[in-house]
Image (spheres, grey):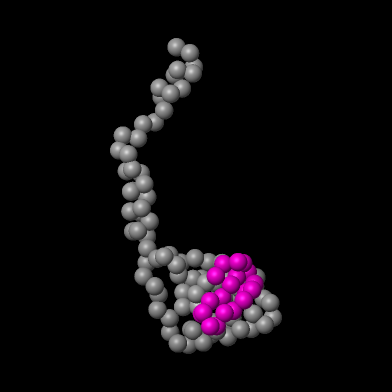
Amino acid sequence: MPSKERRGKWQPYDALEGYKNSLREAEYEKGKISRPALLPDKIEEMNRILQIAYSENRDLIITYYRDGYLHKIEGIVERIDQINGKIKIRSVSIKLRDIIDIEEGR
């Protein structure tokens, strides 16, 4: 049998169509967490760090909550939009209420 005919013969077969996708979705949903609550003194400390870093163009490491998961981003804050309650860092817009932690960068 020529190699071209054998190539298709031994390919994996997905008997349960859509099973892999539903399994990935279930694992994704299982890993979600609820939004962490912040104490008022932690919010004040993060606000102070954010204001200083913004005025002096320092790097920050921001941990934020989105869609059930915690994400980290590092960079210089490009813009603080107090009216809409958002900041922009590395072209990513983050709501202020979603920020969990702010650290000074390296």
On the question of residue 105 being in view, the answer is no
Q: Residue furthest front?
A: 83
Q: Residue at x 35, y 35 (%)?
A: 14
Which quarter of the image is occupied by the C terminus?
A: bottom right
The image quadrant that residue 12 belongs to is top left
In the rendered structure, the answer to whether residue 50 lies left or right of residue 17 reads: right
Q: Which is more toward the observer, 18 or 3? A: 18
Q: Residue at x 46, y 74 (%)?
A: 98
On the question of residue 5 being in view, the answer is yes
Tell me which segment is drawn in magenta.
75-93
Q: Position of residue 33 (x, y in %)?
A: 37, 67
Q: Which is more toward the observer, 19 or 32? A: 19
Magenta segment includes 99: no
The image quadrant that residue 6 belongs to is top left
Q: Position of residue 1 (x, y in %)?
A: 45, 12
In the rendered structure, the answer to whether residue 65 lies left or right of residue 20 reads: right
